[in-house]
Image: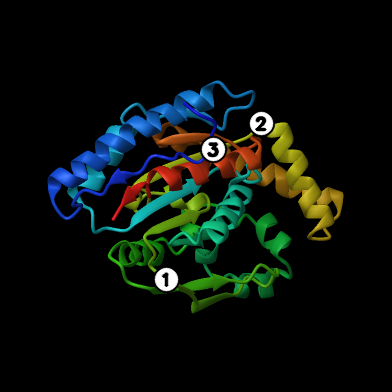
Amino acid sequence: MQSLQEQEKERIFKPDFSCRSGRELLAFYLQTKFKQLFLYDKKQPTPIINAINPGFISRFTKRIINNPSKRMLIGITGESASGKSTICTEIQNVIGRLSMPVAVLSTDNYFHDISDLISKYGSFDKVRDSGYDVDAPSSFQLGTLRRDLDSLAKGNDIKAPMYLPNGTGVSLPNALEVKSQKIIVVEGIATMYDNVKDVFDVKIYVETENNLRKSRFISRAVEERNQDIGNAMKHWNYIACAGEKYVKPFRKEADLVLNGNSDLGYFAHILEYIYDITNKFEN
């Protein structure tokens, strides 16, 4: 397989994707190219793919054949500070360069409004210390999230809630306009919770060593959020336990397990390669 940095020169006559035989040709082509991509990644000094679900490629291409009109939903989850937000940022950068028809949504916007609890206890940290389980499924508007994802999958634009990350605990309903694009990337720990996870066509889990996650988290808390070290450590201890309980179990259900410490430049080349192979057909 040639370098991902090189653009493939051959073009293929575009089959009729409105008929099953045309979509089957596309599925066969993609299966071959994805297998080449995975083999290429294995040979890299720091592979980005840590694990692949054995049935993923077959299931993914069958989905293209059997339900071509449905939007492609990709869910990205992982424990806090694993690198999932950074990967989504790189996805957005590639989207901008290639003008790809992709929408990106964070499930953090679906936290319940806890402004009344913050008023009662005085701060977000005190709410957490009172026993409120911030990352538990019950802390998210999962019913609203599922309805919104179903709407996006059918091609309908939505107005998602917006959770304000300013410590007030306020969630604004219908505040964030999200277009139903050809591909919809959804990031956050709630993507793989029950009643939500089965809507995704591709499930991605991002993992990183705990020591690196801890270093990232503490740095971000102190430098970006002006927390003192003591409180940052207390919050790290909470999210480390919550991640083990609520997030890590979904690793075994993921289609792809990605290395959150991989080189983002290399990750961008992979995205551009995937874009290239899925847009290789001449009209």
Name the residue carrying label 1: 179
Report the residue at 53% width, 53% height from top: 188
Name the residue carrying label 3: 6
Q: Amino acid at mark 2?
A: Glu
Q: How many marks?
A: 3
Secondary structure beneath dot 3 equals loop
Q: Is residue 135 visible?
A: yes
Image quadrant containing the C terminus: bottom left
Cα gap from disc 2 to disc 1, whole angstroms: 35 Å
Task: Give whichever of 265, 52 is nearer the camera.
Answer: 265
Residue 238 in the image: state x and y as whole percent: 66, 46
Mark nearer the N terminus (2 vs 3): 3
Mark nearer the N terminus (3 vs 1): 3
Name the residue carrying label 2: 209
Pair 2/1: label in front: 1
Residue 205 in the image: state x and y as whole percent: 50, 39
Up the image or down, 139 lies above or below 13; here it is below
Secondary structure beneath dot 1 equals loop
Query: Dividing the picture into quarters, in which one does residue 244 lie?
Result: top right
Cα gap from disc 3 to disc 1, whole angstroms: 32 Å
Q: Amino acid at mark 3?
A: Glu
Residue 2 in the image: state x and y as whole percent: 50, 29
Query: Dividing the picture into quarters, in which one does residue 180 lie?
Result: bottom left
Q: Amino acid at mark 1?
A: Lys
Mark nearer the N terminus (2 vs 1): 1
Task: Give whichever of 259, 5 is nearer the camera.
Answer: 5
Label 2 packing within 10 angstroms: few (<14), some (14-19), many (20+): few
Residue 203 in the image: state x and y as whole percent: 41, 43
Q: Is residue 246 visible?
A: no
